[in-house]
Image (spheres, rainbow, N blue to C red):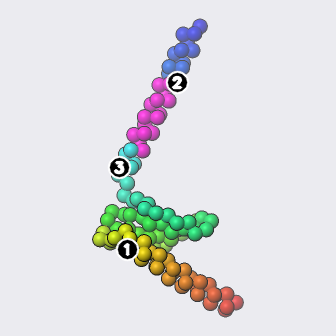
Amino acid sequence: MTDPYMQMLFALALVVCVILFMGLGLKKKRDMNGLMKVLAYQPLGQKKGIAAVQVGREVLLVGVTATDLKLLKTFDDNFDKGGVEKATAADITEKLKKLRAMKDTLYAVK
């Protein structure tokens, strides 16, 4: 009577192990061939933020919303990480000022 139960448990354990090994193999394969790498992400609100993404040798500063992606700035392969942080902070501040000015002019028209 216990023999069929043991066979069933062994078969179940074998199937679970095969699934786990396949999952680990696929994860390693995906990580090896990754074209893009997210270096940093700064949330700016609900479903909004700015991400620094490395694609090959370029670093892209991307604005992210729930429905859209906008390229804010591109850095070439000779970037300095300290310089990138300073440049991105200044660039973000400048873009936010422009967006606020655009918003104010839109609301002033109505």
Q: Earlier in the sequence, mark 2 or mark 3?
A: 2
Q: Position of residue 29 (x, y in %)?
A: 37, 45
Q: Amino acid at mark 1?
A: Gly
Alpha carbon distance from label 2 to label 1: 55 Å
Q: Which mark is residue 67?
A: none
Q: Which mark is residue 83?
A: 1
Q: Earlier in the sequence, mark 1 or mark 3?
A: 3
At 54% from the left edge and 85% from the top edge, which residue is drawn? 98
Q: Amino acid at mark 3?
A: Met
Alpha carbon distance from label 1 to label 3: 28 Å
| Residue 17 located within the stretch drawn in magenta | yes
Residue reaching furthest right?
A: 110
Query: Does 101 appear above or below 9?
Result: below
Question: Of helix, strand and loop, which mostly describes the magenta segment?
Answer: helix
Q: Position of residue 71 (x, y in %)?
A: 45, 73
Quadrant including the N terminus:
top right
* Residue picked out by circle 2: 12
Alpha carbon distance from label 2 to label 3: 31 Å
Q: Amino acid at mark 2?
A: Leu
Which label lies toward us, 1 or 3? 1
* Residue picked out by circle 3: 32
How many numbered discs, if any? 3
Query: Does 59 appear above or below 17?
Result: below
Q: Earlier in the sequence, mark 2 or mark 1?
A: 2
Q: Which residues are magenta?
A: 13-27
Which label lies toward us, 2 or 1? 1
At 47% from the left edge and 34% from the top edge, which residue is drawn? 19
Q: Position of residue 50 (x, y in %)?
A: 51, 69
